[in-house]
Image (cartoon, grey):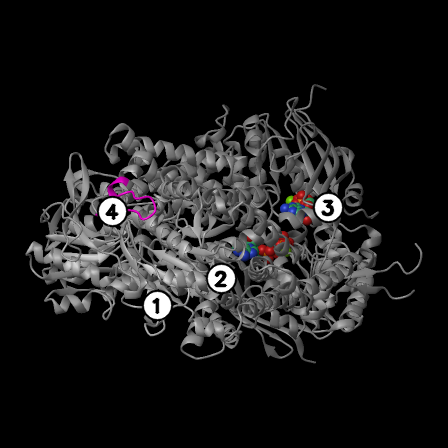
């Protein structure tokens, strides 16, 4: 019994990480319907930026966030205005192909710059610390990750629903033309959305890098989990994305409990089952 | 004589917007019926319900004695219902000829030369033959509307639904259009026509139905309807005495 | 002008396996210098041209470039190294296209049985030298016996070529471990790049394992190792194949990399010399460090040995124009290389020649870490460098 | 007045057909004039060309933007291995049977993923392909995650001599490409093809004109899946070794194929042909540069998408109003000299 | 007459291959209200979209306050002082009533219109301020759309079919509010199918037919028959 509880709890915590992978995707998917194939590689890019900062400045990875987050946000803004804005439209192919190209470029540039050696961010004792809760031993780091996911999602929720910027996001995603009429420059609004998304990516990247080793090639595997969490949760619903991440995480740990070979498979199957029952995800934003 | 199209208790709403409010009426084989109503009254939605582009919330639609309320749009076309779209929906990447050929081969189920000959005849009839090789995406609005009708006719319908095809025509063009529709009608095709260009409508139809907020508010011979003060007020939006 | 013998070389220069190819350029440079004067065969001098192609760590691509080497570069001999994912596709192409092939850096069982090899027949053109799972097992159990801890072993085997071979009930670890009185807890095969090992950890804790073993890629081990600590699982010995080969991987683990144990196929302390250059293992390793500023890694020796074998076969072939003669020359190899003896006449199965294997531990040395040989029972010629220390 | 005539072929298309026929004869004779390497490369090109044409049919005509076609490439590959090793079938029979099985399998898959639209559909197909990959990774008889090789005996059953095998393998690839292009062409020329093109341009109008959209797309999906599996079988007959990662590689079997179709010109028959040629030109000149090659590929994808969203053939067609495959109809009304 | 506030010089507009406007010339003086009429598809909406920047043109084709604005983006045009009440209301469904209104003040121009002023004009909106905008009736939505445009304190306000799809009684109330809005010296351009209503509030009229101006003049100088002719191209 306790093993199953353990599996579920660990799954929930794992879901926090997936929700972090997905939060940025969810934001840009929700605001501009952009399917960003490069998202996984951008997470890894953030991890490498974290690595360089920690190595160069000798600071703790969490402190490095103060540098990596603005850096990623800047990259996001430039990327969106310089490149991705030109691919937006009804056709999903241009963004798909352009972000695929971007993904290949980021991945190989990282390979050139950092080689394929696995790297890890060293966060010190926190990595292995744990607390005992009712017979379960829970890692501080996964708890922190989950807490971070909640904070990030609550933060995005706040920005989205209680600030002028968020009003701009929602307006532009509802109707680009009319939002333009209100004086919102959609290119800038999209740039801000991508900046915010990549700032979140920075958090995801650093936490990933602390949790496990990374190399330039592992982005793709993270991407699909992110997409699944977004879609399970429902397009444009940020709390739904957290729920999606948790469902994915729990499905994986339960699957692994039955047979480790089914871990990832169980996550995918949970995704397909959700879609078979609710093609728009569990909590889709109410459509007009 | 039994009705070709029989609608009873049809209901449909989008949230708070009611587009069909317990609508019932019959259209007899060979009849030509006009539909009037203010913008947003639910006229186009009614066509969408009849053709199957929309599913009703309640009520029945029967065609040629068969209940088609849940039949797919494609099937309904094959049974003999074809329409023109108010906002033209040309197959933009195809030529005018190919657009109409879709109607002939898919809707009417014609093959090979038979289909081509039928399409040429329809294009001739609707005055589009000179533009047969032009990409539909490059047509002007008027030609797009003509194409809407041509495509519907190419499907050899028993019931033809026309949605605002006369708007913006010059006098001569309008007369030609009326001519064409009369010919189609004389050929035995049943017609329901939504039109704001009332004089064109009156030249063809034998009966008028007026709807507002999804409700049928008047039905009868054109003359009676047009003279009714209620219709003048609601539809023409002018005081009856102007 | 001397005629040229072309040697193809498929290696994962990029991708997750790129660590294995780190020393390629250094080794090839040395060899090209050596081969500059030509190699003599039947009294005639030949140039050797080595054509390197990148497999991108992708078995598909490995097969593709192997085919390219064979068909468009028309190589006379093809070579490949680094895990069954690289060696097997290349060997398969060679076998079917009838080109002699020498490979290394992959345990022989996944190489031989993974390619559907039949011990009664063997292969006609493809040859492999490395150690096998029986060596890993003997070394690992040797280590564990030295450690004197409870004989309960948690097994971490991924669902990849190596993991399936190591975990195979007949050919892999389970049988021999049972015979030697170890109880193996093996929850099953995980997909590589796993995010969560909670279930393994729970199972190992439940069974009271004091040893963990397996064969994993570094990211997976990193994830497992932190989660184990978080979830209160602290084995006394952790002996893992593949993940702990490279100093960079250990560096990435920080302090928790100290004390981990692994198999050692080659080290600067191996008492062997190159048949080509006469360099000793130590000289080769320090040469690499001097040239690149990076610490030595195990594949260096094997990469060098690969070309020792090829060069040796070229000198002995009866007719360098004839693939069958070249294959026969490889088959007849009997030489000492920088990784030990290579001789295909006394392998466990046809086409396989075994090299010695020892095991050891990553220990602190100054402010870095160093891989120290602690158990040499199965290759006593290789000196031990220290004693096994228990974890934590 | 004489009745106008309806024709489909144009001068350009007739010339193109003659050139194509001649080229085909030359290509069919390749085993006698080309080297082994060229033969193999051309074989691979033909197989990629086939994949590109099939993906183009789905995405460019039926609007089904799938990033999961590797599911069927891998399935076809695995069926080749399973049916020859365990079923004792001749490889060619196994590949054909793989196509049939893929068609059967694609129906329930379609029932699931056709519920999704646009980007959801794309990601759904990707997940399905991952499910295929992970499922095949669980089948230990086929080597699980490590994969398996095609026994030499089975390869030899194709032909006794090496050159015989190479020629056969080449002809199979050429035959596959010719079959796929011909089938796609004939399909698009048929009433069904007209229906499919109509769906691409306007689904509402298409269904109003009697086209069953769901069924038409399903047909395309099933047929494409079957062909894709056959191509997958042929690809792995060349590679001789299969593993889940190789068989279900999203990069190799879908991303590159999308790249080919989009740079060539999606929604045209000519596009995939041009795209395949460009892709292989790039690959053959740059592949030895490893990371640089891939970065260039990424950059080309981005630049083409931004500068010529309709691809290279789109540029050519807009400029010269060319059509090499006569799909469209021309009405010739100029009977009298006006 | 002083320099017109808005001047169109041979404005052309295209949707891809399709040309929707052909050389439209138009002038609008400060404080003036004009009506644009025409049949379905005549190009009225297109004209509004061109002025407001949703369709980009050559810079000189649209002049505002003497500046060429034809090539500006819609958000830049909004900052310059032009607001559009779009056809079919087009509120932002994810925003509440008040958020929709607030969005209107993004450009931050100074002037008489504020949230309170709009609530004074349409008191019902104050009651519904926190509701999702889609839950309002069509007429109330139209009020939000008008309020949203006013919030930017524009120099020129464009109304596209404000009575479209509204019940007569609601149309009546909107038209009752209209003089309050434009009496403050605001310049306005009204597109309206209902000719009577349009003419009642404007001083001059332009009639479009198939993308061309087919009739223009002062309201009092134009006869019904002229309008019908210009509308349909028929000599009635
Ligand atoms: N798919 C839909 N979703 C939500 N609302 C809709 C939808 N289709 C139509 N409506 C609404 O239903 C109402 C009736 O629309 P419909 O198109 O039937 O009007 P109509 O009578 O044809 O008007 P017009 O004369 O302007 O063409 C309108 O308010 C419209 O906004
Ligand atoms: N996005 C578009 N793409 C292509 N053509 C368009 C587009 N929008 C409008 N059109 C065409 O431009 C022409 C003018 O349209 P516009 O909407 O300006 O007319 P309107 O006078 O506002 O008509 P209505 O009274 O129906 O609102 C029409 O022929 C229409 O079909
Ligand atoms: Mg309508
Ligand atoms: Mg309009």
Front residue of A117/A30: it is A117
Please tell me whether mark 3 or mark 4 is closer to you in this view. 3
Q: Does the CB distance between marks 1 and 3 fall below 8 Å?
A: no
| Disc 3 target residue | D319
Q: Any mark on residue D143, and which?
A: 1
Q: Can residue B237 be seen at all in this image of the molecule? A: no
Q: Any mark on residue A146, and which?
A: 4
Give me the residue at 64% from left, 48% from top: D312
Give me the residue at 15% from left, 34% from top: C366
Q: Are marks 3 and 2 on the same chain?
A: no
In the image, the segment drawn in magenta is: C271-283
Q: Residue furthest front?
A: C43
Vertically, is A271 above or below C299?
below
* Displayed quadrant of residue B158: bottom right
Element carrying mark 2: loop
Q: Position of residue A73 (x, y in %)?
A: 39, 34
Q: Does the CB distance between marks 3 and 2 fall below 8 Å?
A: no
Vertically, is C156 above or below E116?
below
| Disc 2 target residue | C322
């Amino acid at each position: 019994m306790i093993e199953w509880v353990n599996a579920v709890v660990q799954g929930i915590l794992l879901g926090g990480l997936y929700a972090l992978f997905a939060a940025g995707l969810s934001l840009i998917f929700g605001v501009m319907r952009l399917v960003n194939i490069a998202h996984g590689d951008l997470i890894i890019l953030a991890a490498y930026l974290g690595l360089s900062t920690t190595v160069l400045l000798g600071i703790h990875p969490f402190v490095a966030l103060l540098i990596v987050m603005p850096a990623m946000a800047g990259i996001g803004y430039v990327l969106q205005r310089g490149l991705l804005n030109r691919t937006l439209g009804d056709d999903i192919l241009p963004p798909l192909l352009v972000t695929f190209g971007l993904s290949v470029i980021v991945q190989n540039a990282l390979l050139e710059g950092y080689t394929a050696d696995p790297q890890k961010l060293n966060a010190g004792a926190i990595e292995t610390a744990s607390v005992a809760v009712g017979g379960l031993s829970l890692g501080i780091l996964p708890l922190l990750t989950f807490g971070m996911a909640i904070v990030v999602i609550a933060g995005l929720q706040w920005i989205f629903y209680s600030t002028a910027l968020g009003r701009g996001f929602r307006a532009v995603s509802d109707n680009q033309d009319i939002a333009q009429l209100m004086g919102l420059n959609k290119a800038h609004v999209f740039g801000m959305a991508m900046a915010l998304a990549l700032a979140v990516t920075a958090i995801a990247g650093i936490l990933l890098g602390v949790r496990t080793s990374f190399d330039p090639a592992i982005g793709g595997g993270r991407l699909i989990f992110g997409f699944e969490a977004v879609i399970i949760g429902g397009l444009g619903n940020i709390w739904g994305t957290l729920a999606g991440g948790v469902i994915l995480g729990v499905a994986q740990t339960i699957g692994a409990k039955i047979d480790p070979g089914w871990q990832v498979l169980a996550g995918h199957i949970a995704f397909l089952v959700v879609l078979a029952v609710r093609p728009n995800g569990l909590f889709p934003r109410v459509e007009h | 004589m039994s009705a070709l199209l029989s609608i009873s208790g049809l209901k449909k709403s989008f949230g708070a917007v009611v587009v069909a409010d317990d609508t019932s009426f019959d259209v007899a084989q060979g009849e030509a019926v006009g539909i009037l109503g203010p913008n947003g009254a639910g006229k186009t939605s009614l066509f969408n319900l009849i053709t199957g582009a929309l599913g009703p919330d309640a009520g029945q639609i029967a065609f040629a004695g068969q209940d088609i309320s849940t039949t797919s749009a494609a099937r309904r076309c094959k049974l003999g219902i074809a329409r023109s779209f108010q906002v033209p929906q040309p197959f933009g990447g195809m030529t005018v000829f190919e657009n109409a050929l879709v109607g002939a081969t898919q809707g009417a189920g014609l093959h090979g030369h038979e289909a081509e000959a039928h399409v040429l005849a329809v294009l001739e009839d609707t005055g589009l033959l000179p533009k047969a090789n032009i990409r539909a995406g490059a047509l002007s609005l008027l030609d797009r509307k003509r194409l809407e009708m041509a495509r519907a006719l190419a499907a050899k319908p028993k019931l033809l639904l026309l949605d605002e095809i006369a708007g913006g025509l010059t006098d001569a063009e309008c007369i030609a259009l009326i001519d064409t529709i009369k010919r189609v009608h004389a050929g035995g095709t049943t017609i329901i026509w939504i039109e704001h260009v009332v004089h064109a409508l009156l030249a063809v139809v034998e009966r008028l139905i007026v709807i507002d907020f999804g409700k049928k508010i008047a039905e009868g011979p054109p003359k009676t309807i047009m003279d009714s003060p209620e219709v003048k007020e609601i539809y023409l939006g002018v005081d009856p005495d102007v | 002008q001397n005629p040229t013998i072309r040697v193809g070389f498929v290696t994962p220069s990029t991708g997750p396996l790129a660590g294995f190819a780190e020393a390629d350029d250094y080794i090839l440079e040395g060899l090209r210098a050596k081969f500059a004067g030509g190699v003599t065969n039947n009294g005639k001098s030949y140039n050797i041209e080595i054509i390197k192609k990148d497999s991108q760590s992708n078995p598909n691509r490995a097969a593709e470039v192997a085919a390219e080497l064979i068909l468009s570069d028309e190589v006379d001999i093809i070579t490949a190294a680094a895990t069954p994912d690289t060696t097997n596709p290349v060997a398969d192409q060679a076998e079917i296209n009838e080109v002699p092939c020498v490979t290394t850096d992959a345990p022989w069982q996944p190489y031989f049985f993974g390619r559907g090899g039949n011990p009664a027949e063997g292969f006609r053109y493809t040859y492999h030298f490395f150690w096998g799972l029986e060596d890993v097992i003997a070394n690992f159990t040797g280590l564990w016996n030295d450690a004197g801890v409870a004989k309960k072993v948690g097994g971490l085997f991924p669902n990849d070529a190596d993991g399936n071979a190591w975990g195979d009930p007949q050919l892999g670890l389970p049988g021999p471990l049972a015979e030697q009185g170890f109880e193996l807890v093996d929850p099953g095969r995980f997909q590589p790049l796993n995010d969560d090992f909670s279930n393994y950890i729970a199972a190992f804790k439940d069974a009271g394992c004091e040893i963990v073993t397996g064969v994993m890629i570094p990211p997976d081990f990193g994830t497992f190792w932190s989660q184990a600590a978080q979830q209160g699982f602290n084995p006394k010995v952790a002996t893992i194949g593949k993940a702990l080969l490279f100093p960079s991987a250990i560096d990435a683990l920080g302090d928790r990399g100290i004390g981990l144990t692994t198999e050692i196929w080659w080290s600067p302390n191996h008492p062997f010399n190159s048949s080509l250059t006469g360099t000793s293992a130590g000289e080769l390793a320090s040469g690499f460090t001097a040239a690149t500023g990076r610490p030595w890694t195990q594949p260096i020796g094997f990469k060098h040995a690969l070309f020792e074998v090829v060069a040796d076969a070229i000198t002995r072939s009866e007719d360098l124009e004839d693939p069958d003669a070249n294959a026969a020359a490889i088959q007849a190899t009997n030489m000492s290389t920088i990784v030990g003896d290579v001789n295909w006449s006394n392998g466990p199965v046809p086409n396989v020649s075994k090299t010695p294997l020892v095991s050891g531990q990553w220990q602190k040395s100054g402010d870095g870490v160093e891989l120290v040989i602690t158990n040499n029972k199965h290759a006593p010629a290789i000196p031990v460098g220290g004693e096994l220390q228990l974890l934590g | 007045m004489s009745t106008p005539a309806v024709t489909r072929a144009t001068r350009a298309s007739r010339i193109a057909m003659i050139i194509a026929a001649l080229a085909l004869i030359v290509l069919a004779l390749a085993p006698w004039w080309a080297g082994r390497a060229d033969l193999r490369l051309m074989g691979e090109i033909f197989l990629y060309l086939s994949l590109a044409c099939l993906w183009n049919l789905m995405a460019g005509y039926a609007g089904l933007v799938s990033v999961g076609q590797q599911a069927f490439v891998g399935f076809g590959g695995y069926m080749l291995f399973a049916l020859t090793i365990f079923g004792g079938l001749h490889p060619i029979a196994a590949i054909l049977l793989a196509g049939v099985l893929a068609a059967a399998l694609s129906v329930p898959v379609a029932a699931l993923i056709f519920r999704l639209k646009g980007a959801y559909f794309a990601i759904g197909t990707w997940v399905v392909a991952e499910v295929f990959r992970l499922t095949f990774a669980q089948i230990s008889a086929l080597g699980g995650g490590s994969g398996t090789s095609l026994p030499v005996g089975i390869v030899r059953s194709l032909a006794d001599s090496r050159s015989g095998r190479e020629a056969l393998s080449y002809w199979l690839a050429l035959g596959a490409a010719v079959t796929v292009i011909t089938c796609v062409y004939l399909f698009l020329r048929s009433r069904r093809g007209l229906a499919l093109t109509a769906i691409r341009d306007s689904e509402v109008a298409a269904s109003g004109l009697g086209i069953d959209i769901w069924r038409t797309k399903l047909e395309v999906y099933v047929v494409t899946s079957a062909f894709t599996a056959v191509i997958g079988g042929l690809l792995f007959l060349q590679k001789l070794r299969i593993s889940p990662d190789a068989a279900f590689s999203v990069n190799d079997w879908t991303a590159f194929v999308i790249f080919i179709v989009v740079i060539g010109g999606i929604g045209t028959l000519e596009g995939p042909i041009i795209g395949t040629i460009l892709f292989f030109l790039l690959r053959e000149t740059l592949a030895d540069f490893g990371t640089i090659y891939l970065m260039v590929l990424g950059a080309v994808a981005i630049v083409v998408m931004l500068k010529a969203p309709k691809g290279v053939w789109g540029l050519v067609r807009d400029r010269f109003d060319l059509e090499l495959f006569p799909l469209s109809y021309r009405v010739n009304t100029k009977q009298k000299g006006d | 007459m002083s320099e017109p506030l808005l001047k169109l010089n041979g404005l052309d507009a295209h949707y891809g291959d399709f040309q929707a406007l052909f050389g439209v010339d138009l002038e609008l003086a400060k404080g003036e209200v004009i009506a644009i009429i025409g049949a379905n598809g005549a190009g009225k909406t297109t004209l509004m979209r061109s002025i407001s920047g949703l369709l980009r043109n050559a810079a000189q084709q649209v002049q505002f306050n003497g500046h060429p604005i034809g090539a500006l983006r819609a958000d830049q045009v909004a900052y310059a002082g032009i607001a559009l009440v779009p056809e079919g209301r087009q509120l932002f469904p994810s925003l509440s009533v008040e958020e929709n209104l607030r969005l209107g003040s993004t450009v931050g121009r100074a002037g008489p219109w504020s949230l309170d002023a709009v609530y004074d004009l349409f008191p019902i909106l104050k009651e519904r301020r926190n509701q999702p905008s889609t839950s309002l009736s069509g007429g109330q939505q139209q009020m939000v759309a008008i309020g949203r445009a006013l919030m930017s304190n524009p120099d020129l306000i464009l109304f596209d079919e404000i009575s479209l799809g509204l019940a007569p009684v609601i149309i009546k109330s909107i038209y009752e509010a209209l003089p309050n809005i434009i009496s403050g010296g605001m310049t306005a351009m009204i597109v309206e199918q209902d000719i009577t209503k349009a003419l009642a509030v404007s001083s001059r009229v332009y009639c479009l037919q198939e993308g061309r101006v087919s009739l223009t003049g002062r309201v009092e100088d134009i006869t019904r028959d002229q309008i019908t002719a210009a509308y349909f191209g028929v000599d009635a």
